[in-house]
Image (spheres, rainbow, N blue to C red):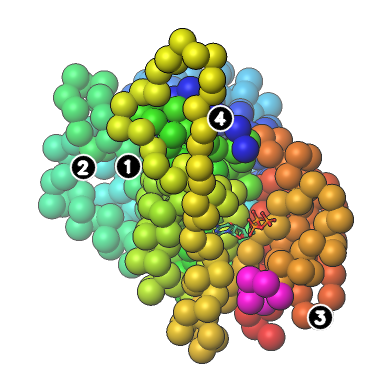
Amino acid sequence: MQIIGASPRPGLGARDKMLHSEAMNDLAGKHILLGLTGGIACYKAAELCRGLIKAGATVQVVMTDAASQFITPVTMQALSNRPVYHSQWDAREPNNMAHINLGREADAILIAPCSADFMAKLLHGRADDLLSLTCLARPIESVPLLIAPAMNREMWAHPATQRNVAQLKADGAQVLDVGSGDQACGEVGDGRMLEPQELLEAVVALFQPKSLQGQRVLVTAGPTYEPIDPVRGITNLSSGKMGFAIARAALEAGAEVTLVAGPVSLGTPRGVRRIDVRSAREMQQAVQAAAEDTSVFIATAAVADWRPANPAEHKIKKDGSAQAPTLSFVENPDILAGVAQGERARSGALYCVGFAAESQDLLANAQAKLARKGVPLIVANLGPATFGQDDNALLLVDAKGVTELPRADKQTLARQLVAEIAHRLKS
Ligand code: CTP
């Protein structure tokens, strides 16, 4: 247990470093056609292009004339290390059919930014420039089309745009959300293009196997915080990284994901429903409510086993006697065991996965916990070697035996764990 001076606030900030670094090689071997259309968000396409390449992809940039008003092809060529295409009459292609060749080479097409005008054009199947021509000519079954809209809030909210978004989705395109906030025009509202890191994550997700499609997954993550008085409390060193990585991996695998997070400083993976809590009892309440509608529960949180029995209403002051105050504790509810003993878990409607954070005898402790918690799968790890780290090693213990997931970054491990869980759900 760690006693700290004040309650850590749940993080609302940008992606932490771990999420940046683990993207390395997530797109190895993938070829992405990055299309730019006219919009001030073109400046973000430069960073997106770098991010895609850092993640292992090759990137072919195609720009409309309007996009070239906002960022130069020179910049995009330098970043992508390939000549930029912009004309359907490009004589560099031996067959003079850039619109066919570019679409056939690509594993996915991402248009970022996608203007309102370009969405309208795609919707009608118009093809009077290289990018729209390439989108229309792409093999629709094998080359997914991702659209990252970017525009003024009134343009975004206009019924014509919303109609176009709905129709583009119906036509098989993946239209990503827009961000909200300050706009280049000085107005504030919906319509900003997502940030490069969010777009990168959407592209990475596209290529992950959809092994949890149709599942509703509930994850707990991070430590809990138990107050001693209004300015002090008891917590532990869990950073929440593993739980957040699992939430993201489950989402990538096609699940609907709810994440109940203790006090941590991590950004929420886009698309995950997050509920912030502080104490074990708050976590239990949130979990019990969400579990009603869940098919897989993964308890990664490092829940405090005990809490101070009588938290003081006001700060405990030194009284000059040099005597430390005596704290008495009561046991917290066991959230996982409670869910695992519930009707839904016992009937097989809810599959529960527990974590075991140990400091020694990993296998023996995990086997004991498997029986004690009454869950079908325990994922064991060494607490001191994982808390706060970007990588980890896991031991999966179930009735059939032991599976080892060797040390790797937490996002990779999370994807492997999701695959293991999906496999067990099927069998
Ligand atoms: N857990 C829980 N509620 C608690 C304590 C633990 O839901 N009050 C869950 C954790 O999220 C984890 C699993 O139970 O999935 C095991 O947690 P761990 O701290 O390793 O074990 P404990 O049950 O606390 O047992 P011990 O401290 O004796 O190892």
Real-space CA distance between mark 1 and mark 2, rounded to the nearest whole angstrom: 9 Å
CA gap, disc 3 to disc 4?
Answer: 40 Å
Q: Is residue 129 visible?
A: no
Q: Is residue 376 magenta?
A: yes
Quadrant housing residue 419:
bottom right
Location of the N terminus by quadrant is top right
**Residue type beneath disc 2:** Trp
Residue shown at 26%/50% (left/top)? Answer: 120
| Amino acid bearing label 1 | Val
Q: Position of residue 229 (x, y in %)?
A: 39, 31
Q: Which SS class for mark 4?
A: strand
Which sits in the foreground, 129 or 387? 387
The amino acid type of the residue labelled 3 equals Lys
Q: Which mark is residue 156?
A: 2
Q: Which residue is mark 3?
A: 400
**Mark 4 sits on what residue?**
3
Would you name the residue on which mark 1 appears?
Answer: 178
> Mark 1 near mark 4, Cβ–Cβ under 8 Å?
no
Q: Which residues are magenta?
A: 371-377
CA gap, disc 1 and disc 4: 41 Å
Residue 379 in percent (x, y) is at 72, 61
Secondary-structure class at tag 1? loop
Q: Is residue 114 magenta?
A: no
